[in-house]
C-alpha cells in the first residue's frame, strides 16, 4: 500500500514562494505519473501540474504556467511543486496524486488512483 504525504504548505504574502513536497512510502513511485490537484474554498478540485513517470514531461494548468514548477526525485521517492509569485487566487488545499496514466492527471475529472491528505496554502494580499 502506497501512502502519499504532503508537506510545505503555509501562509505566504502575495508575490512570495513556497515549495510543496510529496513523499511516498510503502512502494516506489516509478510506475506512476504524479501530479498536484488543488481545491479552493467553495470550488471543485482542479488540475495544477503533472509530471510523467520518467520525469521528462511536465504539464501545467494555464493559471500557473510560468510560476509553478513540478519535479520528481526518484532516489527520494518524492515529488515537488515549487510555487513562485503566488497570488491570492492560489489559496487552496493542494493534494498530491498519482496514477499510472498521465492523461488522467492532465484531464482530471475526479478519479485518480492515489491521493495524499492535502496541505493548505494560503496567500494573503
Image (cartoon, rainbow, N blue to C red):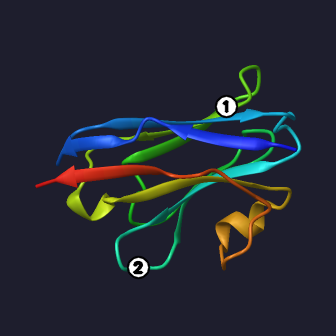
Viewport quadrant of the C terminus: bottom left
Q: Is residue 121 above or below residue 40?
A: above
Q: Is residue 55 left or right of residue 65?
A: right
Q: Earlier in the sequence, mark 1 or mark 2?
A: 2
Mark toward the viewer: 1 or 2: 2
How far apart, in angstroms, are the residues tagged by discs 1 and 2?
28 Å
- In which quadrant will I find the N terminus? top right
Looking at the picture, tell me which residue is in the foreground, 16 or 94: 94
Residue 107: % across, % down: 67, 74
Label 2 neighbourhood size at 10 Å, few (<14), some (14-19), many (20+)? few
Quarter occupied by residue 65: bottom left
The residue wearing badge 1 is 78
Crowding at mark 1 (Cα within 10 Å: few <14, some 14-19, many 20+): many
Name the outermost residue toward the left.
125
User: Could you say where residue 55 lies in the image, as x and y percent from the top left?
Assistant: 72, 39
Query: Regarding mark 2 in the picture, which secondary structure is present there?
Result: loop
Q: Nearer the viewer, residue 75 or 54?
A: 75
Instruction: Name the residue located 29 percent from the left edge and 37 percent from the top edge.
Output: 17
Which disc number belongs to residue 43? 2
Residue 97 rendering spot, x and y as whole percentages: 67, 54
Where residue 118 appears, x then y in whole percent? 53, 52
Amino acid at each position: 500500500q502506497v501512502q502519499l504525504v504532503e508537506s510545505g504548505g503555509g501562509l505566504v504574502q502575495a508575490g512570495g514562494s513556497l515549495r510543496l513536497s510529496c513523499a511516498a512510502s510503502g512502494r516506489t513511485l516509478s510506475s506512476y505519473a504524479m501530479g498536484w490537484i488543488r481545491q479552493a474554498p467553495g470550488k471543485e478540485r482542479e488540475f495544477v501540474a503533472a509530471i510523467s513517470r520518467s520525469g521528462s514531461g511536465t504539464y501545467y494548468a494555464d493559471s500557473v504556467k510560468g510560476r509553478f514548477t513540478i519535479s520528481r526525485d526518484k532516489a527520494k521517492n518524492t515529488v515537488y511543486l515549487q510555487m513562485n509569485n503566488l497570488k491570492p487566487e492560489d489559496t487552496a488545499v493542494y493534494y498530491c496524486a498519482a496514477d499510472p496514466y498521465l492523461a488522467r492527471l492532465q484531464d482530471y475529472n475526479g478519479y485518480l488512483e492515489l491521493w495524499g491528505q492535502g496541505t493548505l496554502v494560503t496567500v494573503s494580499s
